[in-house]
Image (tube, helix red, strand yellow):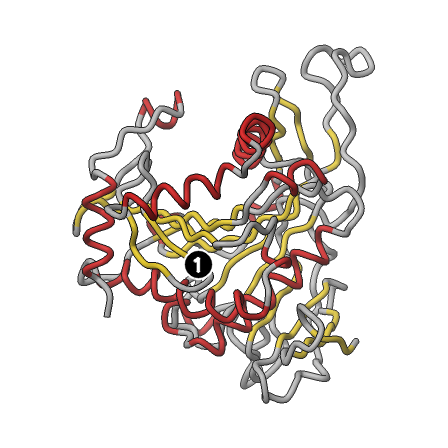
């Protein structure tokens, strides 16, 4: 299928193909690059994995996904067996093409999906099963976003043109996934580094499309709604203005985006990248905003890597408003970039206070972290 990514007039073409087991794979092309019009995937794959469960925790009011089939997923393969590299010289990977720019495909071992549907509201007593209730099908969608065919690259080293293609892919997928039946929250993210728990070294991210607002997103949405109702102004806009006026936690400022270390940062390295204009998600960004994002975001990642002699592990989490009118009215897209690295040879682990109680203790003041990141500019 031939289509165009993102907004009208986009220069990024995308082609939709099917892998051997029926999963969708979308090939996004850099401007001026020929699109991938044909793939051949002769692999004899097992039937699609899935069939997980969603169980409702009545003590916390949160859903938990149970995905036993993920135990069989690929774990830290050598470079010559990487499933995200192009298929070459008779070695078939998840990407059945000799080359590509950016590829998004349905995860072979999804936490959610591949089925879609509405998640039922939990009842006090589900069909006599007691307070634990009846498990629901793990509906939703999980996708993998591969940034580059270079196995040894990183997002920080993609260059503005390729980073812009990834931004376009995020935006296109956010819009498409948000429109699927039953989807209530779309979450693009990247885990980098084995210390974070990465199971594939090839530069890539993921997108989860949940049938419920993820717990942290739901808390942010509730506070944003309450602040808007009380003050008449969006909460994130107030925070961005206050950080800009204070200045000591700012890391960089552009025409459309600014980045700062939040006052109450939980992690030794934590930066929030925020658009100056209120938008609910990546799909709502203008072309000019996407252009600047493709420059400033890799800049932030490169600063993390300049702090120490070895690459810094991180989680890059795009916080988008849940898919409903009230949250989109109050919400404000932003990136939360965090790393547990507190020194060259030390990591912060979630101990009792953080893991059990959610009460964070940070050894690094936000102002000190911001000063180091400012100094790490090229």
Q: State which quarter of the image contains the C terminus.
A: bottom left
- The residue at 51%/50% (across/down) is 318
Return the x and y of residue 72 as percentages of the image width and height.
Answer: 56, 50
Q: Which residue is at a point 48% across and 71% down the rendered structure image?
A: 163
Q: Is residue 23 left or right of residue 220?
A: right
> Compared to 198, does 95 lie above or below?
below
Most extreme residue toward the right is: 127
Nearest the camera: 130 or 206? 206
Q: Quadrant of residue 111?
A: top right
- Provide residue 173's location: percent of width, then percent of height: 66, 60
Q: Residue 221, located in which quarter of the rendered image?
A: top right
Q: Is residue 166 above or below residue 58?
A: below
Query: On screen, 113 above or below 162?
Result: above
As drawn, is 323 to the left or to the right of 217? right
Residue topped by disc 1: 257
Quadrant housing the N terminus: bottom right
Side (left or right) of 378 relative to 226? left
Whether 42 is drawn above or below 248: the answer is below
Q: Position of residue 329 (x, y in %)?
A: 65, 41
At mark 1, the secondary structure is: strand
The image quarter in which residue 151 lies? bottom left
Viewed as shown, does residue 128 lie left or right of 28? right
Find residue 201 and report its horizontal and vertical position in percent.
41, 63
50 or 149: nearer the eye? 149
Look at 22% across and 43% down and name the residue there. Answer: 367
Total number of numbered discs in the rendering: 1
Q: Residue at x 57, y 33 (%)?
A: 232
Label 1 neighbour load within 10 Å: few <14, some 14-19, many 20+? many
């Amino acid at each position: 299928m031939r289509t165009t990514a993102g907004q009208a007039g986009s220069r990024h073409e995308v082609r939709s193909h099917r892998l051997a087991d029926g999963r969708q794979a979308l090939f996004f092309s850099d401007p001026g690059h020929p699109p991938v019009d044909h793939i051949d995937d002769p692999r004899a794959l097992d039937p699609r994995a899935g069939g997980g469960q969603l169980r409702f925790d009545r003590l916390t009011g949160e859903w938990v996904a149970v995905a036993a089939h993920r135990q069989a997923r690929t774990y830290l393969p050598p470079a010559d067996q990487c499933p995200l590299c192009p298929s070459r010289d008779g070695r078939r990977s998840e990407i059945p093409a000799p080359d590509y720019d950016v590829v998004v495909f349905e995860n072979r071992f999804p936490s959610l999906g591949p089925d879609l549907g509405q998640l039922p509201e939990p009842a006090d007593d589900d069909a006599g099963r007691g307070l634990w209730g009846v498990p629901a099908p793990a509906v939703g969608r999980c996708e993998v976003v591969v940034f580059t065919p270079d196995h040894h690259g990183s997002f920080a080293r993609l260059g503005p043109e390729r980073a812009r293609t990834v931004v376009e892919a995020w935006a296109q997928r956010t819009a498409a996934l948000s429109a699927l039946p039953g989807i209530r929250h779309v979450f693009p993210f990247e885990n980098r580094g084995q210390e974070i728990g990465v199971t594939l070294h090839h530069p890539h991210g993921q997108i989860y499309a949940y049938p419920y607002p993820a717990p942290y997103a739901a808390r942010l949405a509730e506070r944003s709604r309450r602040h808007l109702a009380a003050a008449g102004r969006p909460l994130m806009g107030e925070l961005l203005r206050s950080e800009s006026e204070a200045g000591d936690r700012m890391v960089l400022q552009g025409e459309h985006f600014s980045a700062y270390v939040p006052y109450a940062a939980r992690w030794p390295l934590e930066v929030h990248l925020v658009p100056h204009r209120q938008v609910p998600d990546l799909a709502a960004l203008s072309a000019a905003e996407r252009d600047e994002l493709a420059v400033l975001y890799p800049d932030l990642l490169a600063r993390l890597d300049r702090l120490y002699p070895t690459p810094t592990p991180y989680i890059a989490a795009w916080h988008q408003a849940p898919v409903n009118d009230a949250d989109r009215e109050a919400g404000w897209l932003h990136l939360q970039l965090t790393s547990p690295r507190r020194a060259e040879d030390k990591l912060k682990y979630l101990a009792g206070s953080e893991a059990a109680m959610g009460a964070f203790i940070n050894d690094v003041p936000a102002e000190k972290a911001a000063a180091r990141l400012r100094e790490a500019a090229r």
